[in-house]
Structure formats: C-alpha cells, structure tokens
Image (tube, rainbow, N blue to C red):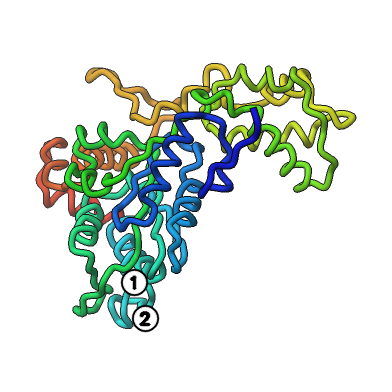
Amino acid sequence: MNTMKVKGFPNYLTNDLRLKRLIKFAESVADTPHPLLLLGETGTGKDLFAEEFHRASGSSGPLVAENVAGLDEQLFADALFGHTTGAYTGAVSDRQGLIEKAEGGTLFLDEIGDLSVASQIKLLRVIENRTYFRLGSDEPLRVNARFVFATSSNLLTRIKNGLFRPDLYFRLSAYEVHLPPLRERKEDLRLLIRHFVASAAESIGRENPTIKPGFVAQMEKHSFPGNVRELKMLVLKAVTFAQDGVLDEETGAMVLDNHLMTGKNAHILIDHDPIELSDDIIRFPSQLPTMLETRKALVAEALRRTGGNQSKAAKLLGLTPAAVNKFLSKYQL
C-alpha cells in the first residue's frame, strides 16, 4: 500500500480507512462557521488535526492555539477576552485576547475538559452570543473566528460527575471527530515509523538507518498508550542508539525494555478517569502528609467533586460555606 497524504490535510499521514473518513468529513465542514470538537487520547494528533483543519478552511486569518488546562477563571477570562488598562491591579496596558488575535481565522482551545465550571459558563455565552467584552470594558466586541476545541478527557464521565456542563458540550460538538488511538490503527505503524525515522535522523545529523522487519515487529507488540507522540519519541531513541545504521529487532527490544510506559504501567495514559476507592479505604503514601496537607487535599477533592461549588463542597465536608471560603482565602487555594 502506498503512503497516503489525504487531500486538504497534506501533513496527516494515514492508511487507516476510519481516519481517512473522519478527515474527509472534516474537510467537508471546514469552511462553515460552526465549532469542531476533537476527542481522543493524549498523543493522537489533535493539535495537528486542528492545524490541517484550519488550512483546509481557507481562512485568511491566523490559527491561534492555547492549552487551557490549569487556567483558573480569572486567567482564562483574561487570556480569552484580553483587558483594558486599569482593568485590575497590574493591567498597565491594553492586551489583546485570544479571540481578537484569531480574527478572521481559527481559535484552537486544547484540553477544554479541564476548564472550571465558571469558565465554562463564560465560554458558553461567547459561543451562543458571538460577542464578548474585554475585562474592564463595557463595549461589546464581535467574535470573528472559528472555534476548534479538543480534549483527552471523557466528557460524558465529567458531565455525569458534575464537572462539565451538558449545554456547553452540545454547543461545542456541532461537528465532532473522535481520533482513534494508535493501537487501533496498527496498519499505520510502518508508515509512521518510516516518516519519524527520516525526521529523527535529520534532527541529529545522521543518515537514514535501514529499518528491518524485526524492528517493526517489536513496535507492533507495544500498546502505545501515548499514541503517535509516544511512537515519535521511541523512534528518536532508536535512531540515536542504532548500531551500524540499522534498526533491527534488538534495537526495538532495547528501546522498549528501557521505556516507562510498558508492562504494568502501560494503562496509565489510557485510563483518564480518576481511580475510585471504596468508601472505607484511604491509601496514604509511604511518607505521611501533614495535617495541613491532608486538609488541603480534602478540600480540593470536595471542590473537584462539586465542580468548584463552595456551598456544595462545604456540605460534603460537614462545614459551613464561610469556613471553606476562609480556608481557601487563608491558604490562597
């Protein structure tokens, strides 16, 4: 089978029929104004898919990408909307937000599943109204950018646990693409290995090594919890350690034997849902945490379970909302 570059997605290499169908679908909606939601495990190439999708749209504006994991409500609002001078302490000049930077193009927000509920509400209003306000300004601005969202989280699980708003999910998923993990498209392994071997050799200034069937066979044994990103890293290691310009079975075995994500650890990146312990069991690390560390962890877990709602978290902890708020303020949590 020949190496295939899908029309409109020239940098996305695949021979997988399901993935090619998804790309064809994405091409067909690339010039529409509706959001695209990319789902899939970490390392499946959601960022590259977003880049190719933007290219296929023919937009005259730029692609602006941001990973929103870890951004609290204030940081997210400032990043998305920008601010005016004096909007808050430290705002010494006007700042463009991501929406404004993506004018006429595409705004790609990665790890959208990790947004706080408060930030989700802000995002929902922007998508619904197609308007926003810079922080510190009462002048409405029009959204003139296409939205692409991505997450490696299981959104249905997060919705069930109250961590993600179902109304936002339905707004994000006008067009939804679930990128398959590499372990489900093993026919792409040879194709991707050849591509990554060439780029790895170039990056370290070496001639392309010869790829033996034994090397590919070794890679085929691995489940690739880190997907294409993990394969790229393994190939770089193999090319670096290749003896006499040959990648063979021994090289593949050596690289995998020294790889963290094999054997008993291989499930870690595949299972994105939190581990559930029985109600009467708490497992502590070998070095016991302090009382303060334990209290912080307990409050953080209660807030996680309630989507950041302090009143509901207080009820779970048997405290008053005022006590929880005081604790959060005291320790700047």
SS of the residue under disc 1: strand
Q: For the point 44% across and 27% down, which residue is it?
A: 270
Image quarter for residue 217?
top right
Q: Which mark is residue 69?
A: none
Q: Which residue is mark 1?
A: 82
Image quarter for residue 73?
bottom left
Q: For the point 60% across and 37% down, which residue is it?
A: 4
Residue type, label 1: Gly
Image quarter for residue 153?
top left
Q: For the point 73% across and 22% down, which residue is it?
A: 215
Q: Is residue 72 above or below residue 161?
A: below
Q: Relative to the observer, which residue lies in front, 61 or 66?
A: 61
Q: For the point 43% across and 64% down, which residue is it?
A: 59
Q: Relative to the observer, which residue lies in front, 232 or 19?
A: 19
Q: Is residue 83 above or below residue 221?
A: below
Q: Residues within 10 Å of mark 2 (few under 14, many from 20)?
A: some
Residue type, label 2: Asp
- The x, y position of residue 162, in whole percent, is 19, 38
With 291 as the anchor, is 55 left or right in this view?
right
- The x, y position of residue 54, in whole percent, is 45, 56
Q: Residues within 10 Å of mark 1 (few under 14, many from 20)?
A: many
- The x, y position of residue 281, in whole percent, is 28, 19
Asked if disc 1 and disc 2 are in contact, CB closer than 8 Å, the reply is: yes
Q: Is residue 70 visible?
A: no
CA separation in Å, label 1 and label 2: 8 Å
Q: Which residue is mark 2?
A: 94
- The x, y position of residue 129, in whole percent, is 18, 63
With 202 as the anchor, is 5 left or right in this view?
left
